[in-house]
């Protein structure tokens, strides 16, 4: 199967991309026989977004993303990333544990994970409420 190029693959912008992104693109390019590639920049609430719904005919190739985990809470929060078979691949979270003497409980102070150069078919937020996504959506 001949390798299809990312729009702009041969132009100066892709030539100046990081080696990590080039490796990611070469790998993701082989995962599905895509017919449509859509550049996608999304910033907004995770709830109700297209990223929550599984569809075997789509794959997201992410250049850069940020997930907002909100304020301190008694629960650990994370994002689950799913592969093309709708199986969980990994969990993203940056929880800092501390003891709150006022409530006499363990609390989680949260940082927002910033993740670059990965792919997924869908995400499931566990306590995360906002995201920024910059990348591509491939569809069959």
Image (spheres, helix red, strand yellow):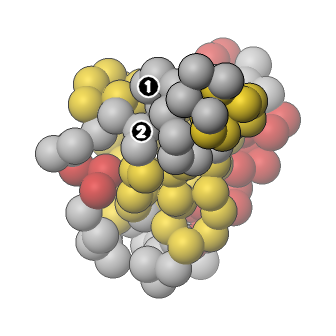
Q: Which residue position holds label 2?
A: 128
Name the spot of residue 117 as percent of width and height, x first.
Answer: 67, 40
Is residue 21 rendered to the left or right of residue 114? right
102 is higher (above) or lower (below) than 56:
above
Above-or-below relation of 57 to 76: below
Inspect this view and state whether residue 59 appears: no
Question: In percent of the image, x 27 and y 25: which residue is there?
Answer: 44
Check disc 1: other Cα within 10 Å, few if <14, some if 14-19, many if 20+: some
- Left or right: residue 42 versus residue 100 is left
Within the image, what quadrant is residue 48 found in? top left
Q: Residue at x 75, y 19 (%)?
A: 16
The correct choice, above or below, for 60 with respect to 132 in the image is below
Q: Is residue 84 visible?
A: yes
Instruction: Judge by depth and name the residue closer to the eye, 110 or 129.
Output: 110
Q: Is 2 in front, or is 32?
A: 32
Q: CA distance from mark 2 to mark 1?
A: 7 Å
Direction from residue 25 to residue 139 in the image, left or right: left
Q: Residues within 10 Å of mark 2 (few under 14, many from 20)?
A: many
Q: Are marks 2 and 1 in contact (CB under 8 Å)?
A: yes
Residue occupying the point 65% across, 26% down? 100
Tag 1, which secondary structure?
Answer: loop
Q: Quadrant of residue 27?
A: bottom right
Residue at far left of view = 48
State which quarter of the image contains the N terminus. Answer: bottom right
Place of residue 39 in the rendered image (x, y in percent of width and height, measured from the top left): 36, 34
Task: Give the side of residue 19 with respect to residue 128, left or right.
Answer: right
| Residue 62 % position (x, y) | 54, 41
What residue lies at 66% left-to-right and 16% top-to-bottom? Answer: 12
Secondary structure at badge 2 equals loop
Q: Earlier in the sequence, mark 2 or mark 1?
A: 1
Q: x and y percent of residue 133 in the render?
A: 43, 31
Residue, disc 1: 70
């Amino acid at each position: 199967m001949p390798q299809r190029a990312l729009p702009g693959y041969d132009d100066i912008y892709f030539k100046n991309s990081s080696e990590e992104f080039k490796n990611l693109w070469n790998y993701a390019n082989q995962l599905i026989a895509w017919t449509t590639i859509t550049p996608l920049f999304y910033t907004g609430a995770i709830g109700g977004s297209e990223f929550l719904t599984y569809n075997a005919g789509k794959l997201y190739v992410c250049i850069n993303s940020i997930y907002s985990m909100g304020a301190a809470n008694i629960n650990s929060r994370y994002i689950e990333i799913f592969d093309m078979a709708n199986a969980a691949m990994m969990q993203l979270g940056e929880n800092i544990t501390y003891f709150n003497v006022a409530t006499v409980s363990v609390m989680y102070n949260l940082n927002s994970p910033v993740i670059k150069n990965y792919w997924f078919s869908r995400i499931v937020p566990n306590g995360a409420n906002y995201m920024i996504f910059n990348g591509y959506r491939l569809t069959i």
